[in-house]
Image (cartoon, rainbow, N blue to C red):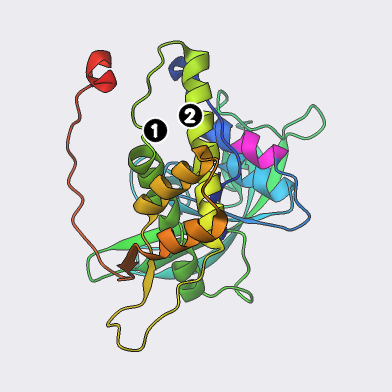
């Protein structure tokens, strides 16, 4: 769970590969989150789930989750309009029974599989009322995306949701920094407990670095073509040195960080190339 504004990881769940379930992990992190302030949870395709939406609502929080527009996602069973854009609200009753009431009201009742996970059914309550707002937005002439949310139209328009969801890209860049700038893509241990220990160490160091970087302001110059920010990869190296050093002082660290700046160039897009990566042998990682 990554906080987009502070730039740090707030929670993490490790699962064995044979028990890997991202929906369950998200529900765990949502349930154990303790804060006096409500949050807006944002997630990519694959996380849309009635159970996930219910968990977030039960905590009194909000969500913006991207849904699959085709295939086996929630959208396929909601009878949505075939238009380029829409912003509609639906009141659904989630249930597992295939009764006459459910059959005759397919727009109102949404029956899920008997083996599907839904944590809010009890012996006395076999239906769960869920209000969904479904927004389809156009990103370009050929690209659209569908967002599920419980934010009201009065608070957030479709354009607001588009800008809000765009912020989610911050977690992708955070993963990149964690995996490559701090080396979490490769570990030195073989024992599962020691691997988790390594990853916790890298997460703690990541949060330490981002906390320091977040407290340093870059003074912008009028003659610069772009606005500049700290180079995160160099900042990771400097902050790691600061962590280990017994002589390096905080003012020196700030001066060192300000020596490495990169321009801020927003709204750049690149084609996504999928490249298969082979496993790295343990001896090669040591070398």
Residue 70 as seen in the image, left or right of residue 215: left
Majority secondary structure in the magenta region = helix
Other-residue count near label 2 (Cα within 10 Å), few / some / many at <14 / 14–19 / ≥20: many
| Residue 163 location (% of width, % of height) | 45, 70
State the residue at coordinates (42%, 60%).
257
Q: Residue furthest top?
A: 191
Bounds of the magenta span? 27-32
Q: Secondary structure at mark 2?
A: helix
Q: Residue furthest front?
A: 247
Other-residue count near label 1 (Cα within 10 Å), few / some / many at <14 / 14–19 / ≥20: some
Residue carrying label 2: 199
State the residue at coordinates (75%, 51%).
35
Q: Could you tell me which quadrant the N terminus lies in?
A: top right
In the image, residue 207 above or below residue 4:
above
Q: Are marks 2 and 1 in contact (CB under 8 Å)?
A: yes
In the image, residue 151 above or below residue 121:
below
Q: Could you tell me which quadrant the C terminus lies in?
A: top left
| Residue 26 location (% of width, % of height) | 57, 38
In front of the other: 46 or 284: 284
State the residue at coordinates (62%, 59%).
150
Residue 169 visible, this angle? yes
Residue carrying label 1: 184
Residue 5 as seen in the image, left or right of residue 239: right
Q: Secondary structure at mark 1?
A: loop
């Amino acid at each position: 769970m990554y906080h987009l504004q502070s730039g740090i990881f707030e929670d993490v769940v490790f699962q064995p590969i044979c028990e890997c379930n991202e929906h369950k992990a998200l529900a765990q992190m949502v349930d154990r989150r303790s804060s006096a302030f409500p949050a807006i949870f944002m997630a990519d395709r694959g996380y849309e789930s009635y159970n996930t939406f219910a968990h977030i609502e039960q905590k009194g929080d909000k969500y913006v989750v991207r849904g699959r527009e085709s295939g086996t996602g929630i959208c396929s069973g909601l009878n949505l309009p075939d238009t380029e854009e829409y912003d509609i609200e639906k009141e659904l009753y989630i249930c597992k029974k295939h009764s006459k009431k459910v059959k005759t009201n397919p727009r109102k009742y949404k029956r899920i599989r008997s083996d599907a996970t839904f944590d809010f059914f009890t012996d006395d309550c076999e239906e769960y009322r869920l209000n969904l707002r479904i927004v389809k937005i156009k990103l370009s002439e050929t690209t659209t995306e569908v967002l599920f949310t419980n934010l009201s139209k009065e608070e957030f328009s479709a354009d607001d949701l588009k800008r809000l969801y765009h912020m989610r890209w911050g977690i992708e860049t955070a993963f990149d920094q964690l995996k490559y700038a701090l080396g979490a893509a490769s570990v030195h241990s073989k024992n599962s407990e020691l691997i988790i220990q390594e990853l916790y160490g890298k997460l703690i160091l990541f949060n330490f670095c981002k906390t320091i970087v977040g407290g340093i302001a870059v003074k912008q110059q009028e003659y610069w073509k772009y606005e500049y920010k700290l180079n995160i990869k160099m900042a990771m190296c400097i902050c790691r040195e600061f962590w280990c050093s017994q002589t390096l002082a905080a003012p020196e660290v700030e001066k060192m960080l300000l020596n490495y700046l990169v321009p801020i160039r927003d709204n750049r897009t690149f084609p996504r190339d999928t490249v298969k990566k082979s496993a790295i042998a343990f001896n090669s990682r040591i070398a």
